[in-house]
Image (cartoon, rainbow, N blue to C red):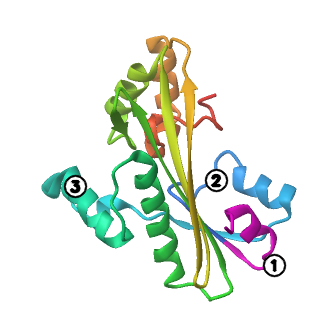
Amino acid sequence: QLSPVKLIERSNVKLVCTTDDPVDDLGYHQKLKAEKQLSFQMLPAFRPDKAVNLNNDGFDSYIQKLSQVAGFSIDSYGKLVEALSRQKAAEIAAGAAPEDLILAADTVVSVDGRMLGKPRDERQAAEMLATLSGREHTVYTGVTVRRGSEVVTEHEATAVRFRPLRREEIDAYVATGEPMDKAGAYGIQGYGC
């Protein structure tokens, strides 16, 4: 079976990535370009809330619709992030050249059997961080690599433990703005570490 890494390694083409944060405040994308000598373009990410009105249809209805688009039953967080990353890749592929290599990813956080997506506002971000404080949770990330009709999708589940956080720490972190486009309201690669 072709893995995402093998598809990337054997490609000598432009890489198209999606992000919810097109402003590279912390320089990750520029660093990746320089260190790995990759040429890629950043595009806005697929937003499921734009595809389906979650407030009216509800989450269960959204998952049903996403299952139809994905072509398989979404009965786990792993399958959910795989379907979301495939949807992102499909949206980008519609406007990409056949030789373009597309890398799309999506992440959700699970704690106590509850999914934490991106926070609606700063209050919800602080609530999410307080929920995660001093506890272990699971981060699910789905990755899809696509070039033309070749599509490879996988997911990874990672256990993460937070040390206990003080309210002042939570408030200071939320004030950075970083939690607002991150599942679970934090980015382990940014200020959140």
The magenta span reads 1-15
* Residue at image location 86% in from the left, 55% down from the top: 35
- Residue 177: in sight, yes or no? no
- Of helix, strand and loop, which one carries label 1? loop
Quadrant where the N terminus sits is: bottom right
Mark 3 or 1, nearer chain start = 1
- Depth check: give the residue in front, 171 or 55: 55
Mark 2 or 3, nearer chain start = 2
- Of helix, strand and loop, which one carries label 3? helix
Of labels 1 and 2, the one closer to you: 1
Of labels 3 and 1, the one closer to you: 1
Please indicate whether residue 80 sits to the left or right of residue 155 in the image: left
Q: Is residue 100 magenta?
A: no
What amino acid is found at the position of numbered circle 2 in the picture?
Answer: Asp
What amino acid is found at the position of numbered circle 1 in the picture?
Answer: Asn
The label number, if any, that marks residue 27 in the structure image = none
Instruction: Name the residue that disc number 1 marks.
Output: 12
The label number, if any, that marks residue 54 in the structure image = 3
Q: Is residue 15 above or below residue 156?
A: below
Instruction: Name the residue that disc number 2 marks.
Output: 24
Q: Is residue 104 above or below residue 97?
A: above
> Residue lying furthest left in this view?
56
- Distance CA(mark 2)–CA(mark 3): 28 Å
* Residue at image location 38% in from the left, 47% down from the top: 76
Measured as percent of width and height from the top left, residue 144 is found at 57, 64
